[in-house]
Amino acid sequence: MNPRMYRYAVLIVFFFFAVFALAGEKVWVSAKGAKLKADKKASAKTIKTLPMGTGLKVLDFQKRWYKVSTNELETGWIYRGKVAKTPPASDDEMEEDLLGDLDESGIMLAAADTSRSIRGKNKKGDDGNTSKVVLEKDEYLEALNLVLSFYASDDDIDAFLKQGKIGEYAE
């Protein structure tokens, strides 16, 4: 067998092993509003919007897209950033992870407020010395309320990703 034929044979065997390794692999939808697409691009027709936690069987992987089938035997493409290799935690597990050992810390949830985490920022004066600037309560509450008032809808986020060619829109 000549070297060129040998290389082709090795590539073909490797390809089949890769396909069989992916076959049967399972991923779970890990993002709200994940879309099963007809083709491996964000602009492709949406077959179905999949609920978070949906289990999917991997049929193929190309670039940043998984070709998958659902339990209802629908087949399509989903962006890799919308799935995880482990099932999402239940609501109880997520709450436990978020709170951690807070019960053992001695801090009551009702008593934990933002003032405990406010830190002054450094400011260099005209004389070259650095000093801490401490915000007054009204100032940081006003700043916090301003930040909390910002809202971005799913459509706004999608438009931002599309305009910046980020994530599934990076083609």
Image (cartoon, helix red, strand yellow):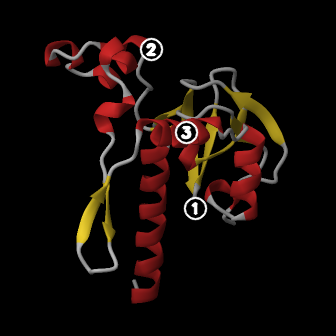
Q: Quadrant of residue 116?
A: top left
| Separation (CA) of disc 2 from disc 1 | 32 Å
Mark whose residue sits in front, 1 or 3: 3
Q: Quadrant of residue 163?
A: bottom right
Q: Quadrant of residue 68?
A: top right
- Position above or below: 17 against 112: below
Residue 61 coordinates in the image, percent (x, y): 56, 52
Q: Earlier in the sequence, mark 1 or mark 3?
A: 1
**Residue furthest toward the front?**
127
> Which residue corresponds to mark 1?
63
Q: Which mark is residue 49?
A: none
Q: Residues within 10 Å of mark 3 (few under 14, many from 20)?
A: few
Residue 129 coordinates in the image, percent (x, y): 23, 75
Quadrant (top left, top right, bottom left, bottom right) of the N terminus:
bottom left
Label 2 secondary element: helix
> Which residue corresponds to mark 2?
91
Residue 144 coordinates in the image, percent (x, y): 51, 38
Q: Earlier in the sequence, mark 3 or mark 2?
A: 2
Residue 78 coordinates in the image, percent (x, y): 65, 44
> Which residue corresponds to mark 3?
142
Q: Amino acid at mark 2?
A: Asp
Q: Amino acid at mark 3?
A: Glu
Q: As drawn, is 145 to the left or to the right of 72? A: left
Label 1 secondary element: loop
